[in-house]
Image: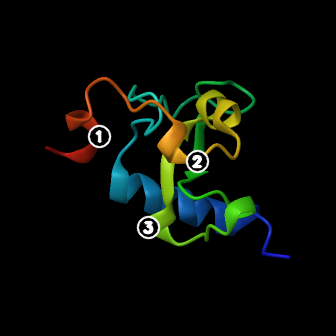
């Protein structure tokens, strides 16, 4: 079984993900209000592009910022089945 998320490790990963990808939900494309805290569905969560249940890792390249509600709704759905944000340029830096 892989390492669990929690405590300082989670805080460090959140900081790295935000620094690398910004505070925009990669699932819906909307801004994430970092002042909100869980269980608020608009709070920050870290999504695994390839879910851990499908063999995904905790490497930065597999992590993206997401709203807690968007991440919870996605569950372990493959990204190929997720509708991308309307304006992908906001998200991919094009």
Query: Residue 8 occupies which quadrant of the picture?
Result: bottom right
* Label number found at residue 91: 1
The residue lying toward the viewer, choosing from 62 and 22, is 62
Q: Is residue 71 above or below residue 7?
A: above
Report the Cα–Cα distance between label 2 and label 3: 16 Å
Q: At 69% across and 24% down in the image, what residue appears?
A: 40
Tally the numbered discs.
3
> Which residue position is annotated with label 3?
61
Q: Position of residue 69 (x, y in %)?
A: 65, 28
Q: Mark 2 Cα within 10 Å, few/some/many (few <14, many 20+)?
A: few
Query: Residue 87 occupies which quadrant of the picture?
Result: top left
Tell me which label, 1 or 3, sits earlier in the chain.
Answer: 3
Q: Position of residue 31 (x, y in %)?
A: 40, 28
Q: Is residue 25 left or right of residue 56?
A: left
Q: Nearer the viewer, mark 1 or mark 2?
A: 2
Report the Cα–Cα distance between label 1 and label 2: 18 Å
Q: Is label 2 in a helix, a strand or a loop?
A: loop
Q: At 51% across and 35% down in the image, what residue appears?
A: 82
Q: Nearer the viewer, mark 2 or mark 3?
A: 2
Question: Which residue lies most toward the left here?
Answer: 94
Report the Cα–Cα distance between label 1 and label 3: 15 Å
> Which residue position is annotated with label 2?
78
Q: Position of residue 88 (x, y in %)?
A: 26, 34
Tell me which label, 1 or 2, sits earlier in the chain.
Answer: 2
Which corner quadrant holds the N terminus? bottom right
The residue lying toward the viewer, choosing from 8 and 42, is 42
């Amino acid at each position: 079984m892989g390492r669990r998320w929690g405590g300082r490790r989670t805080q460090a990963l959140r900081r790295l993900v935000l620094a690398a990808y910004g505070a925009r939900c990669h699932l819906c494309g909307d801004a994430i209000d970092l002042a909100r805290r869980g269980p608020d569905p608009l709070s920050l969560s870290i999504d695994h592009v390839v879910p851990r249940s499908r063999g995904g890792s905790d490497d930065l390249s597999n992590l993206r910022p997401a709203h807690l509600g968007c991440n919870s709704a996605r569950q372990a759905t493959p990204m190929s089945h997720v509708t991308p944000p309307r304006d992908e340029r906001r998200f991919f830096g094009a």
